[in-house]
Image (tube, rainbow, N blue to C red):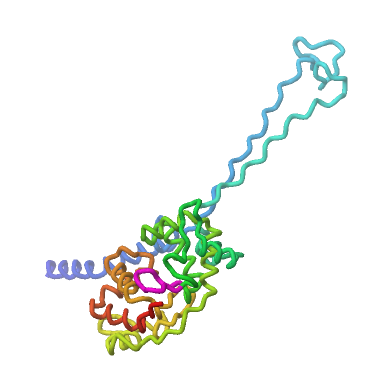
Amino acid sequence: MIEHRKGISIAVLLIVAPPLVTLIATAHQMIGTGGDGLIRARAVTASAPPATQAPATAPAASGAPGAPGATPGATPGATPGTAAGTAPAPTAAAAPPKPPAPVPGRSALDFSASRPAWETFLRDADPAAGKQLAANGKPAAGVQACVACHGQAGITPSGGIFPNLAGLSSEYLAKQLADFRSGARVQPLMNTVARALSEQEIGQVAAYYGTLAGPPMHVGEFGGDAARKLDVQGDGARALPACANCHGLRGMGEGPLIPRLAGQSREYFTDQMNAFRSGSRQNDDVGVMRAFSQRLTDAEIQALAAYYAGPAPQQR
């Protein structure tokens, strides 16, 4: 009987002990004595400035009455070389304490929106200056004219791997040039060009091309049903949203940072999709295009390229 009661006591203890320990540990954390755990909030504050040490009290004057070596007739409080009753020369004021060093990063009370650096490139940018730069280049820095590759008015006449710049927003172009400049987007020719341009010149070129409307394009006539379905519906089974959700119906553009696909050559579209697939282009927002491109087949990329390109450009 005794052993039976002892077994029951042990069983009850095993049942009650774990919740009790958990309750005690939780209370320990909630009252703020559990260290820097997840329950206790911490406040990040700047360190207080060091206290300024008061200047040491000057020793008693040697001429004080009764002091050894006191000069007869000297007035108490007077120092040698000063008239009796004249206050001693003021000492230099202690330097004010330095303000505390700012805490790195943004504070918990800073709710302002974080703005990308390239936005400042566009501030007060002159499209007319950008037009001159696009037409003439910057020979002193080894930068050829933009029209040499991108055509007059931003339309590449013969297609190829050079993109049409007309119809793209100034914000998108400024971001891409900033990415070329920083190396976030890699293309040897454009990396060299962007690094030779100043921030002001990048803003001017982007502002100029942002004023040019893309030519009317009869997109959607090629590529077949596969491309049309990907554009309008996507493919839920492969987690592929409709391309039109971001790039607009038939790739006509949607938002300042989403590029217009309509009218881009088949070669350029295919080249960029393959760059996203391989990871050689990585300046897409949170890797969206890299993920989507890897879920497409080669045939689907070719179909979409034909769908967005429309009719082949006429040779002049």
Kindly indicate the quadrant of the structure image that contains residue 250.
Answer: bottom left
**In the image, residue 247 lies in the stretch drawn in magenta:** no
Kindly indicate the quadrant of the structure image that contains residue 194.
Answer: bottom left
Q: Judge left or right: residue 65 versus residue 255.
A: right
- State the image coordinates of residue 157 (x, y, percent, origin top left): 41, 74
* Residue 147 visible, this orientation: yes
Query: Main structural element of the magenta stretch: helix, strand or loop?
Result: loop
In the rendered image, the vertical position of residue 129 relative to residue 308, given as above or below: above
> Which residues are drawn in magenta?
155-165
Q: Judge left or right: residue 308 versus residue 132.
A: left
**104 vs 210, nearest the viewer:** 210
Specify the quadrant that holds the C terminus: bottom left
* Residue 115 visible, this orientation: no
**311 vs 110, nearest the viewer:** 311
Specify the quadrant that holds the N terminus: bottom left
**148 vs 73, nearest the viewer:** 148
- State the image coordinates of residue 302 (x, y, percent, origin top left): 27, 78
Residue sitting at x 36%, y 87%? 220
Residue sitting at x 36%, y 83%? 310
Residue sitting at x 43%, y 82%? 252
In the rendered image, the vertical position of residue 222 relative to residue 92, given as above or below: below
**139 vs 289, nearest the viewer:** 139
- State the image coordinates of residue 88 (x, y, percent, origin top left): 80, 25
Kindly indicate the quadrant of the structure image that contains residue 283.
Answer: bottom left
